[in-house]
Amino acid sequence: MNTETGQTTQRAGILGGLRDFFAGMYRLYKFIVQFFKQVFIPPYEIREVINQCYEVGCKTLPLITLTGFITGLVFTKQSRPSLSEFGAASWLPSLVTIAIVRALAPLVTSLIVAGKVGSNIGAELGSMKVSEQIDAMEMTATNPFKFLVVTRILACSLMLPLLVLYSGGVGILGSYLNVHTNELTSFRGFMNDAFSKISFLDIFSSVIKSAVYGFTVGVISCFQGYNATNGTVGVGKAANQAVVISMFAIFLEETVIVQFVNSFLR
């Protein structure tokens, strides 16, 4: 009897977990649909979008600068011994640039934004939700979804491609510093070698990927914060889930987009 009861409880727990998962996915779907409905309906909160672009872009710039530079520097340093064994050290600039443009810059920058900006959005909207500030905005005839959610999602979607391009440029400069220190390569010669294998499709796909990642971070972070409950505990949970789920979604999207781009290149 105890075994049967335990199995029944386990099945009930699994079914309850699946029910909660699909219910959450349905609420997220409705949240995304509401965003696309609201984004094209006036009034347009241009000033708040600009303010959120500053929050997403400028305030993450120092961290992205440091991370991008170190990524290019370290990746070049770690790749040099392997290429030198095959007498292919001259391929180092193009190898590092391909890796940075196609994968490292979009992925690393998106994860940084998910960790810093995503947690801030989740905590900010969560605290406004549990303190009933969002309800107060509705009482004053202000559309809280448009002012709080739409503006933040747009800011993440617009700023992340710019941050990725900036991070890629800083990473390439870090790679140049390592190459120049070891081989005294000129800046012009390094750049000619670096971009000899880079096509417009590489840069375009990187920008599109980063826009998708920015949209993902914005939607998930706003969704978690806008639906926070249970007081301060719910605020912390919303901030944590905003980061964890955003990073998980970015890795999934990276896998799908890479497969799509590779099949297209063939």
Image: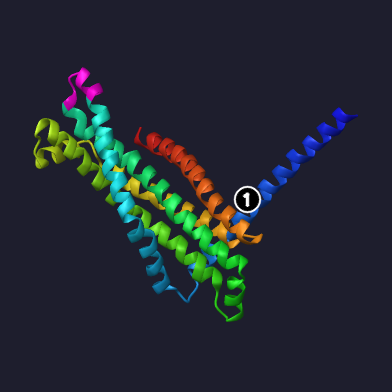
Look at 29% across and 45% down and name the residue there: 68
Residue visible at 54% across and 64% down in the picture = 125
Look at the image and say whether residue 99 sits in the magenta stretch.
no
Is 265 above or below relative to 16?
above
In this figure, which residue is indicated by the disc labeled 1?
25
- Is 87 magenta? The answer is yes
Most common secondary structure along the magenta stretch: helix
**Residue name at image x 16 percent, y 36 percent:** 193
Q: Quadrant of residue 197?
A: top left
Question: Which type of secondary structure does the marked residue at label 1 adopt?
Answer: helix
Q: Nearer the viewer, residue 92 or 112?
A: 112
- Identify the magenta region: 81-89
Above or below 152: residue 254:
above
Q: Position of residue 91 (x, y in %)?
A: 19, 29
Expressed as whole percent of the image width and height from the top left, the position of residue 190 reads 14, 38
| Residue 157 x/y as whole percent | 41, 57
Q: Residue at x 11, y 42 (%)?
A: 187
Q: Nearer the viewer, residue 38 or 218?
A: 218
Q: Amino acid at mark 1?
A: Met
